[in-house]
Image (spheres, rainbow, N blue to C red):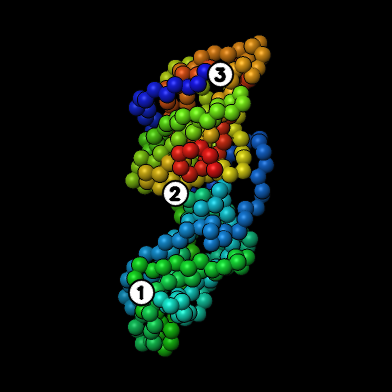
Amino acid sequence: MSPRVIRRPPARVAATALVSLALLGGLASVPAPATAAVPAVPPACLPGHVRAVATLTSRPGGTTARIAITSREIPSCRWAGPAGYQFLSATGATVGPIVHPRARPRDPHGVALPYGFSVVARVTTMSGVRCTTRRAARVRITAPGRPGPLDVALPRSIEVCVGGTTAWTAVLETRVAVARCATGQLALSLGPPNGAAGTSYYPLRLRNTARVACALSGIPVVRALRTVGGAPVGPAARRLRLPGYAPTIALAPGASASTALGVGDVANWPTASCAPAGARALSVSLPGARRVTRVALRVCTRVASLSVRGWVPGTTGQP
């Protein structure tokens, strides 16, 4: 029987845990279910794997360009140093030399950058203090192993020292700390199914309702319940680590992530092996957060007839 979703405000459960995702020193560990293996080393972050946005801050005698480089690769890509940063003019001409960060990753091969997480580079330059200046409109980021550079437009053109006694530019790459999504920050919903032979797949959606970004850490633990707040019905859903799904993902304010919840037809198993029963609610748990929604479905009580995967951005539950 297909689940029937009944809208109801979810119960609030207090949870306040902070994940310090030290992106230049490795990420917080995520429990790994005994499922399909994934490559141990993520691919290098290529220009198409990341998004970069620059903001400017004036300082005495100069300007700092803050560049947030955010991963768009599922499940993650490898941000390898040393990255080089160079200002460019509006026509693409180089403005000053390539400058490398003063802080480097401890891992010479780079660090995993899960979907939605950022490294931040602060490129600080003098402008007009006993120096010869030129105007810059972009910043170019280059690194070994990348087939092409990543050019980032500045919000406005700035003066950059290129000569004189005080000509210099400095770069500092820093980590980003993101709090785990707490129960009160998340809204849970179940979308319409996509049918398959013997199994229906429902997009299980979590939306960040807070005003700050937060992190979903780990493949969720999903259980069918007899009632809202009642006892579990059967084993927890099998947690599958599959290509195209991320175990860790960052959610911007208002953004959604989803996974594919597989609901096996109880007729797939002999009645004695399955022992089917009705469930009226679904519980979704992650470190720091738990949500429950009302449903109507039948599950096996002796074998796991549910399955769940990692996360993808958006609401479809599919990569």
Q: Which mark is residue 79?
A: none
| Residue 70 in sight from this viewpoint | yes
Determine whether 243 is above or below 55 in the image: above
Determine whether, in the image, residue 99 is placed left or right of residue 165: right
Whichever of callouts 3 and 1 sits on the residue coming sooner in the sequence is 1
Q: Which mark is residue 299?
A: 3
Residue beneath the point at 51% across and 14% down: 278
**Looking at the rendering, which quadrant does residue 167 occupy?**
bottom left
Tell me if label 3 and label 1 are in contact, CB under 8 Å.
Answer: no
Picture coordinates of residue 203, whole percent (x, y): 49, 33
Whichever of callouts 2 and 3 sits on the residue coming sooner in the sequence is 2
Tell me if label 1 and label 2 are in contact, CB under 8 Å.
Answer: no
Determine whether 24 is above or below 128 in the image: above
Q: Which mark is residue 178?
A: 2
- Decide which of 57, 279 is in the foreground and name it: 279
Residue beneath the point at 40% across and 64% down: 54
Q: Mark 1 = which residue?
A: 157
Q: Dot 2: few (<14), some (14–19), or many (≥20) neighbours within 10 Å?
A: many
